[in-house]
Image: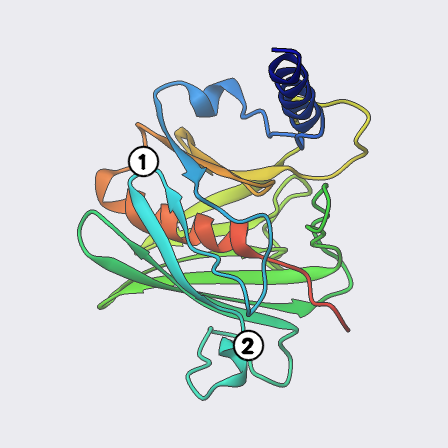
Amino acid sequence: MMRSLVSGTVSLAMGLGALGCAGPRMVAPEDVTQGSQVLEVTDRSSMSGSLVNESFKLGSFAVSDVDRDWNKKSSFSVVGYSNATTTTGYSYKVKGGAGAWDGSCASSANDKGVHVMGGSVDWGSTKLTCECKQGSTSASVVLNSSSPDNDKNSAGALTVGDAKYNVSPVNSTDKTNLGSGAAGFRYDSEEGALGAVEVLRPGRVWLNARLPEAQRMPVACVSAGLMLYQPPSEH
């Protein structure tokens, strides 16, 4: 009986310790969450790298086939990047709904960048582009876009087919005293919020009712690419 009580106490202490060590979570703005479908990330490893299975569930979608050596192969094809200028390149697939989407991301060093708080995720001085394709249909998100029409609150642009939306950082989390930096990014059209992505692990995606149904899976796909980003180990 005493052993059982001790065992139960230890288990409870370990559980509380795990909760106490839980990392911060992004708090999405109210105009994003209202009327939004939330895609929670599950079954995601806390590790990353070529020897780790980095597949995970994103709501009803499955993110799989993560390949972090992809930029070393002849299939490298993210628009605006080459093997010579790319510091990080990786590919992945998103399956579910109407078929599968092929995703790929590339980053390069830049003088200015978007800083993201938390652990191993530090976007630092980086420009990142993620593209998703299904047949002739494509979507992309670019962070730290050099476009002159981006204002100081803009982190880049989201393009889905012929539609182009603004991307801006979200800094709010459920923790305090964590320093400055983005916990994720929100997507907006001229009519208002379209959704958001949390890049802090494990991650989440919000798809607002304002976002057209046909654009939901490609937006989820490029969002998965942002969640998979890891800074290069060497520069």
Circles 2 and 1 in contact, beta carbons < 8 Å:
no
* Callout 2: SS: loop
The residue located at (67%, 39%) in the rendering is 182
Cα separation between marks 2 and 1: 29 Å
- Residue 151 placement: quadrant: top right
Q: Is residue 27 left or right of residue 93?
A: right
Residue type at mark 2?
Tyr
The residue located at (61%, 29%) in the rendering is 25
The residue located at (32%, 35%) in the rendering is 211
Q: Position of residue 24 (x, y in %)?
A: 66, 30
Q: In the depicted view, which residue is nearer to us: 160 or 82? A: 82
Residue labelled with disc 2? 81
* Callout 1: SS: loop
Q: In the depicted view, which residue is nearer to us: 175 or 51? A: 51
Disc 2 or 1, which lies upstream in sequence?
A: 2
Q: Is residue 211 left or right of residue 199?
A: left
